[in-house]
Image (spheres, helix red, strand yellow):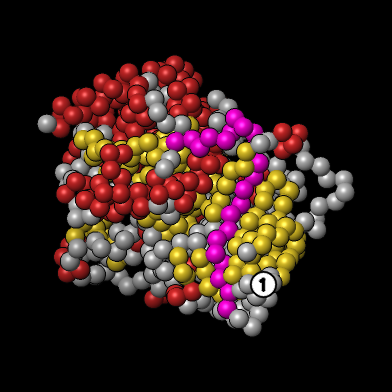
Amino acid sequence: MTLETATPEVATAGDTLPAAEETASVRRVLQRLVLPEDRDMDVLPLYVDREQVRLDAERSVRKGVVVSEVAAPQVEHLEPDAILGRHQLRVRAGKRVSFGTYFNAFPASYWRMWTVVSSVRLDVRVAGDGVTLVVYRSTADGRAQRVNSVITENGGGDFSFELPLKPFGDGGWYWFDVLTGHDDAVVDGASWSALVPEDRAAQGTVTVGITTMNRPDFCSDLLVQVGSDPTVGALLDEVLVVEQGTQKVVDAESFPDAQRVLGDKLRVIEQGNIGGSGGFARAQFEALAAGRSTYVLFLDDDIVAEPESILRAATFADLARRPSIVGGHMFSLYAKSRLHSFGEVINRYRFWWESPGTVRPDWDFGERNLRSSRWMHRRIDVDFNGWFMCLIPLDVVRDIGLSLPLFIKWDDAEYGVRAADAGYPTVTFPGAAVWHVPWTDKNDALDWQAYFHQRNRIIAALLHSPYDRGGRMVKESFYHQVKHLFAMQYSTAELRHRAIEDVLAGPQQLHGDLLTKLPEIRALRTGYDDSRTKTDPDAFPPVRRKKPPKRGQDPTAPRGRVGVVATAVKSAVRQALPPRDLSVKNPEARLPAMDAKWWMIAQFDSVVVSTSDGTMASWYHRHTEEFQSLLRRTTAAHERLLREWPRLARRYQAALPEITSPEVWERTFAASTEDDT
């Protein structure tokens, strides 16, 4: 095969390479073309695109106006046998395929913004005559621009395209398309590479930390995925499984395969159940103690991984301008082409996590791929990345400490904000991702985890909120408490109240609570109707009402702000009245989880409510005395929290270096092991 080089049409006579590029002497591969090994057609749209480009409608974010989108483009699917290997694709005669996809397009704007790379080279190997390669770039608003093209002769060859990153200040990607002629062709690999300074030539190495709790099969399968790719395996120093459950990963059927592919790099550490923060802090601790790795990479135990993501995240971090946390995206485990999380920020006034305003949630690449998704071409900057996949430089850990001892919830968000305050950004990096159960398929704000949501959010705000007395956070917390009380979710309201009381007690008990708090709050919940779930639909009496619904209709959603206020007032008045007699013996309604809003539940005296996954249900009952007692206590607690906020913030901020130190965490690890035995 012959080597042909194409010069991009977008380059002008005035373009020059920066000094760093002129003195660079080492070429590094930044990204390889990859394809799904198992030929899973559900995930194929993330790798190869056959759809016709039809941009979705522009959206006015500033005015909050969403223009109706054009119809989704028609997709012509590839046959499974088109995938010849991890890096090879057959393209049938007379067809066109695009690698302008999530895993194979090059996210140029992220490299332009965060790394020392100023230009890249695309290398493509193609077998076949009359094959056209076309290179494209996109603008920040998703408009595609043709960069260059070549046509193969003499059986194909190796083709290179030099591509600058200068135009990508606000967004944009590079990618290439393949158009065949009269014969089939094979794309036999492609890569994106760059010349980098000599001191950035070495590949950083990784310690992987996986916290597991009674998911032995899932966790073991993940270990096999991580260790199966030799290129990925070469950068692994150690894979740590922090075992905190009673169903052990070493007993999983596939664990011998994990041992085979990972060898002596695999180590299982058993400790007591001190939550996700305890497991991930242990990975940080062990990586620091070993002193070998450049990074520690957190992975959840219930994910399916794209192993190439590990290599890409580490390479990106190697070339970052400053030490940076690099996280991956989350796709749905149940609908694998559906993107669930594309980036997270903290609303500092509310101190609540949310997606950036320009992000479209729950995006299905099977219906509209990258080239047709205008919003995805704008670079998304984040405040933190979830620890389902997150790579952290050990230099950052040495500087700012280990995870907060929070058990679960807000440990990842707080760490990202803490790192940013110390000058270390977080980048949620396109092309690095895992498949995970999406948050929308569960509602952990109503079960025992409500305690940790509430307590840890307040602690994070005490540590990092830039607003006087936490901005809107305390007021919003009180509003949520009232809504839970109106909705007869007394166990949730009680746990949230206990969380505030524990915050007021100060930071010195956080490590001790890792060992005792979970059984304590689980025992507390058992005394409440809304926590008692049953799987049998016949476990509850039939629905009966003394009076039929007004005008034959069940309550509907309140309209506008006035309607919400009116509903709240009516609900408050009803709390002073005794429940209707019949509601004690029979529920007045059954509500699916999707309809179980506070304003709907509040209009009944008892109601059966399904859990978010549809497997169980609870029978809620209205209790006047319980409502009044909780409202009185939670009002006092919120008033005290607001009053003492400045003093509490100083206490938590002063304690932060100690409670996140390896020395204090080491004592907690030891105590958890002793307690577990």
Q: Nearer the viewer, residue 155 or 291?
A: 155
Q: Residue at x 67, y 72 (%)?
A: 154
Residue 300 in the image: state x and y as whole percent. Answer: 35, 46
Position of residue 445 relative to residue 51, above or below, is: above
Q: Residue at x 36, y 52 (%)?
A: 228
> Which residue carries the number 1 mark?
154
Count neighbours of disc 1 (C-alpha within 10 A) and say few if under 14, some if 14 to 19, many if 20 or more: few
| Magenta stretch encompasses residue 193 | yes
Q: Nearer the viewer, residue 533 or 244?
A: 244
Tell me where the magenta segment starts and ends, as one range. Answer: 184-205
Residue 557 in the image: state x and y as whole percent. Answer: 47, 63
Q: Residue at x 34, y 24 (%)?
A: 289
Q: Residue at x 55, y 47 (%)?
A: 429
> 610 left or right of 85?
left
Q: Quadrant of residue 492?
A: top left
Residue 508 in the image: state x and y as whole percent. Answer: 32, 19
Residue 60 in the image: state x and y as whole percent. Answer: 70, 57
Q: Nearer the viewer, residue 28 or 100?
A: 28
